[in-house]
Amino acid sequence: MYSVAMVVIFVLGYLCIALEHPLKIDKAASALLIGVLTWAVFILFGGNDPHSVGEALNENLAETAQTLFFLFAAMTIVEIVDRHNGFKIITDRITATSKVKLLWILSFLTFFMSAVLDNLTTTIVILSLLRKLINDQHTRWTYASIVVIAANAGGAWSPIGDVTTIMLWIGGQITAAKIIMGIILPSLVSMIVPLIILSFTLKGEIERPEESEEAESITTPGEQMALLILGVGLLLFVPVFKTITHLPPYMGMLLGLGVMWMVTELMHKKKSWEIKKRLTVVHILKHVETPTIFFFLGILTAVGALGAAGQLGKLSVWLREVTGGNIYVIDTVIGVLSSIIDNVPLVAASMKMYLIDPSVADFAVDGTFWHMLAYCAGTGGSILIIGSAAGVAAMGLEKIDFIWYLKHISWLALVGYLAGAFCIYLGL
């Protein structure tokens, strides 16, 4: 009975998040409530040993904290570059004013950046560029939504582009070279199909926002260039740091933040207090989007409760029974479910349910099941704005309305997702 109550709490909380604007309740508040209440029901009515539940909660907190520290540090690094007007160097070189042309440029930029960085970091960077390029909010929502689709698609074919592909890579289910060759085309299709459809509906020119001279007047072109190169370089160094030290990615991101913090302190130490207080990290931290952090905390905590209670494992068993073991149907459904439930526990459950079997081609290393799982779990989250880390970040940073995304973008993401999945089915 308690498991039903947990699911009901999750669904009701999900509805509150979806109806954030009509209810006038910030989504972070709803997320925090479902995060705490699901665990409370689990420990009070699940008949479990409080000690074992406490251990499960601590394990979930450790995993969640890694994501939150990664997100917070990445957002701060991007905000530092932005406050110093570093992104102006890039936006000045993007001269396209046609809505369609700009859409394609930003999408491909996001797609390949996401493969090198990761989908979350890339989304944060590109959204900062969008604010410099597009003035109208709803137009920016459209572009931000396509950035989410492109970031998730770009992360799916790279072994370091998404948490789920990293899991499969470390687990030995896939190898770096084979996942790139096997999934890059379906991932590209999942992005290009929505782009083609939107290209017929987007008309006119982009209206750029008026440039603020404040940052430009207190930072020199040299400082702007230095911080842009340093910021992007430190973001790119995160996967390298992980490979060298085998420490979690958030440690590399915190290292980058520490370096940025020290460099800006030294850069501005001889300047007036009025300038320093606007450009120091202590001041910049006040402008980082904190509610997005709390939103992530609530969602990941709630999903962790469902995983600890066994609902996600039962879901995997049910999927195998209902589909008769058809790998294409199983992976496709997992992708759709990842738009509702976080893809990380879904993939983790699948890795436990289906073991590497060299005697069965589909389940051998680099088998079709594992490649399609990487694709579906990575790109399926784009179907809903809340279905991926990139989407949650965009929702928080750009205040994208859940219902708006559902009406205008979800069907595009779904069509692209199914098109890419069909490519894998055809063996392309």
Image (cartoon, grey):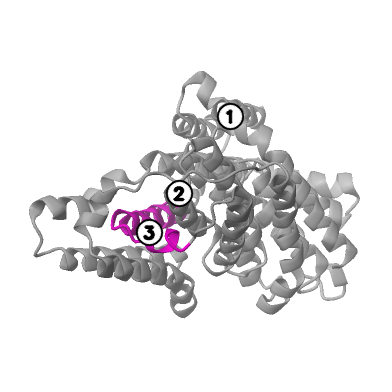
Mark 3 = which residue?
A: 88
Q: Is residue 280 visible?
A: no
In the picture as drawn, the residue positioned furthest to the top comes out as 23
Establish if 253 lies above or below 304. below
Which label belongs to residue 18? 1
Which label belongs to residue 3? none
Q: Residues within 10 Å of mark 3 (few under 14, many from 20)?
A: many
Q: CA distance from mark 1 to mark 2?
A: 25 Å
Q: Which residues are magenta?
A: 66-93
Q: CA distance from mark 2 to mark 3?
A: 38 Å
Q: Is residue 43 visible?
A: yes
Q: CA distance from mark 1 to mark 3?
A: 34 Å
Q: Residues within 10 Å of mark 1 (few under 14, many from 20)?
A: many
Residue type (three-letter) at the residue carrying disc 1: Ala
**Helix or strand or loop: what does disc 3 sit on?**
helix
Q: Earlier in the sequence, mark 1 or mark 2?
A: 1
Residue type (three-letter) at the residue carrying disc 2: Leu
Front residue (pair 41, 141): 141
Front residue (pair 279, 132): 132
Front residue (pair 292, 29): 292
Residue beneath the point at 68% across and 32% down: 407
Residue type (three-letter) at the residue carrying disc 3: Lys
Tag nearer the camera, 1 or 2: 1
Q: Earlier in the sequence, mark 1 or mark 3?
A: 1
Image coordinates of residue 177 in percent, x first then y, are: 69, 79
Tag nearer the camera, 1 or 3: 3
Q: Is residue 212 left or right of residue 279?
A: right
Mark 2 = which residue?
A: 61
Q: What count of labels does the image hold? A: 3
Q: Quadrant of residue 182?
A: bottom right
